[in-house]
């Protein structure tokens, strides 16, 4: 199950990185 947690963390990190520019603009 560790791979699932790692994948989830990676996905969450990617989402945060994608949202940072949006948050900075608005």
Image (cartoon, grey):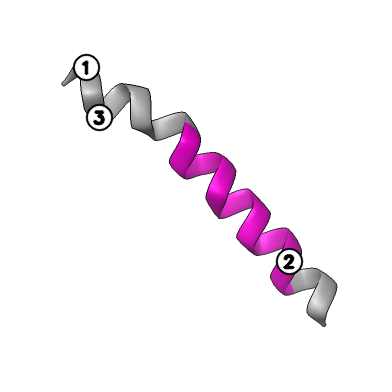
- Quarter of the picture containing the C terminus is top left
Question: Within 10 Å of the Cα at label 1, are there few (<14), some (14-19), or many (20+) other Cα atoms?
Answer: few
Give the left or right position of residue 26, taking residue 14 as reference.
Answer: left
Residue at x-position 74% and y-position 60%: 7
Q: What's the distance in space between the residues labelled 3 and 1, CA to CA?
A: 6 Å
Secondary element at tag 3: helix
Q: What's the distance in space between the residues labelled 3 and 2, CA to CA?
A: 25 Å
Give the left or right position of residue 22, taking residue 12 as reference.
Answer: left
Q: Is 22 rendered above or below residue 17?
A: above
Q: Is 4 rendered above or below residue 17?
A: below
Q: What's the distance in space between the residues labelled 1 and 2, CA to CA?
A: 30 Å
Secondary element at tag 2: helix
Question: Within 10 Å of the Cα at label 3, are there few (<14), some (14-19), or many (20+) other Cα atoms?
Answer: few
Give the extent of the magenta segment: 5-17
Question: Which residue is tagged 1?
Answer: 25
Q: Main secondary structure of the magenta part?
A: helix
Picture disc at residue 6: 2
Cβ atoms under marks 3 and 2 closer than 8 Å: no
Cβ atoms under marks 3 and 1 closer than 8 Å: yes
């Amino acid at each position: 199950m560790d791979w699932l947690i790692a994948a989830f963390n990676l996905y969450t990190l990617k989402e945060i990185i994608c949202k940072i520019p949006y948050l900075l603009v608005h």
